[in-house]
Amino acid sequence: MKGLVLIGLSALAFSVIATESETAPAELVEELTQFCQEVAEEEGTKGKPEDVFILECVNDELEAEGYAKLTSLN
């Protein structure tokens, strides 16, 4: 019985890891980029260059949804 539980937990852990490394759909990245640009315009960039702020913002949102972070928005 303990073996089955360990196998189940291992499968669950692998599933979570696999999900986190998935690349987000381009449409989602585009929507988040627009959202983060609006945040930057309305609330400021906290002293960061706008492109850095937007990338961090997009990555925070992607990470919250279980997607892999981006290295750039190009």
Image (cartoon, rainbow, N blue to C red):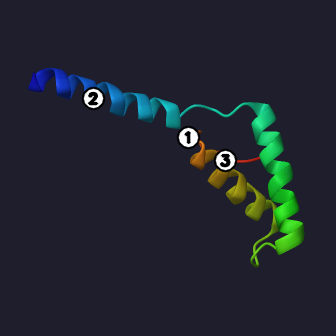
Which residue reaches farthest bottom? 47
Q: Which residue is mark 3?
A: 71
- The quarter in which the N terminus is drawn is top left
Question: Under tag 2, what secondary structure?
Answer: helix
Number of marks drawn: 3
Discs 3, 2 touching: Cβ within 8 Å: no
User: How far apart are labels 3 and 2 at the CA level?
Assistant: 29 Å
Taking the image as shown, residue 53 lies to the left or right of residue 67, namely right
Compare marks 2 and 1 and give the one earlier in the sequence. Answer: 2
Is disc 1 surrounded by few (<14), some (14 to 19) or many (20+) residues within 10 Å? some
**In front of the other: label 3 or label 2?**
2
Picture quadrant where residue 15 is located: top left
Residue 29 sits above or below residue 26 on the image: below
Q: Position of residue 39 (x, y in %)?
A: 82, 64
Q: Which mark is residue 9?
A: none
Residue 46 sits above or below residue 6 on the image: below
Residue in the image at 83% along x and 53% along y: 35
Instruction: Specify whether residue 68 is in view.
Output: yes
Taking the image as shown, residue 64 lies to the left or right of residue 45, namely left
Is 3 in front, or is 69?
3
Discs 2, 1 touching: Cβ within 8 Å: no
Question: Under tag 1, what secondary structure?
Answer: loop
Is disc 2 surrounded by few (<14), some (14 to 19) or many (20+) residues within 10 Å? few
Q: Which residue is mark 1?
A: 66
Compare marks 3 and 1 and give the one earlier in the sequence. Answer: 1
Q: Amino acid at mark 3?
A: Thr
Q: Which residue is mark 2?
A: 10
Question: Under tag 3, what secondary structure?
Answer: loop
